[in-house]
Image (cartoon, rainbow, N blue to C red):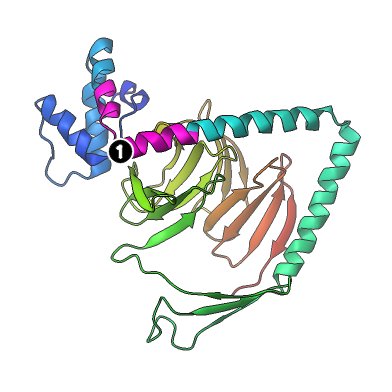
Amino acid sequence: MVYSDKHRKINVPTDNVPIQATLRQLEQPICLFGERPAERRRRLQNLISSLSDNEIAKILLALYHDEPDELQTARYWIAEYALSRAKERIEKLKEYVAIPEVYRTANIQGLYRELREWFMQTLNNTRFWHPQSTLAQDPAMINLASSSFDGSVKLWNLQSHAPFRVSKVKFPSSGRFLVTTCHDHSGRLWDLETQEEILPQEGHSKAVHDITFHCDGSLSATAGMDTYGRIWDLRTGRCIIYHIATGSEDNLCKIWDLRPIKNVYNIAAHESLVSTVKFQRTEGHYLVTVSYDNTIKSWTHPIWSALYSSKGHE
């Protein structure tokens, strides 16, 4: 099926139930043979794009008003939290910009020195698996012990998420929610206060490998095995556009300005697949990349020069 350019600008929910209900309303098949949820979502987008602006507005209004009360409450909470975080971040940015450049540069150089020292410390961390872990040991019991440079020893258990692999479990900055990404092609948002899943976020056609969050807590970015990176507004559930770094099987770390949707720089970072990339959470002064060539590397921003390389795994 050929999709129009206009359909990409139309955001519809990722939940399959309202999508099928809308297709039925449009007198279209709710499911085609072999059609996956992501493909069904794009088909609906394309159908809606052929309607008038007034008809599009009515359909989208109905789609988003059908969300559960718990999810709408969570979206309002995220919006208020992100707004306060954004105000705080902007004030800190104003204070930072007011610092003379010579002192800002000195602070960044100090940060890089601390980062190199931290990498050296992490090489002294060790982990020991229980002899029967993943064999006879109960996952709810102690399966892993870790020791660290900071003098701490921690004991860990395991949890099962059968039948699909859960690739990442992460907290947004608020700490109220938990997000998991899974090989069932979805990401899921959990409210830790009610201990319930409030949103199955579908938008990839293959396994969702990773997720990360904007420091304000309002945006998330997912990376899928379908070769797509997607930016989500947690306040609305819609896929949007932003600024991001990605890693991929071509051994490159790519920097994207997603306002014009343009690849602005390629870092020849590794000799094998780049599995994870992370910006420094606050100012973004450095980037960390992890690869199947068994190395972890860090890079300065915006020059993208190598800061540190660690090879601690086989």
- 11 to the left or right of 141: left
Amino acid marked by disc 1:
Thr
What is the x, y in percent for residue 14?
A: 30, 38
Q: Tell me which corner region of the image, top left, top right, bottom left or bottom right, holds residue 235.
A: top left
Q: Residues within 10 Å of mark 1 (few under 14, many from 20)?
A: many
- Nearer-the-camera pick, 78 or 223: 78
In the image, residue 250 lies at what x, y percent? 51, 52
- The residues colored magenta run 60-78
Q: Residue at x 78, y 60 (%)?
A: 116
Say if the magenta span includes residue 57.
Answer: no
Give me the residue at 54% from left, 61% from top. Answer: 272
In terms of secondary structure, where does tag 1 sit? loop
Residue toward you, 88 or 223: 88
Give the left or right position of residue 196, taking residue 146 as reference: left
Residue 303: horizontal and vertical position, in percent?
Answer: 74, 41
**Residue drawn at the location 12% of the way across and 26% of the way down:** 25
Give the residue number, with chain letter if any, for mark 1. Answer: 14
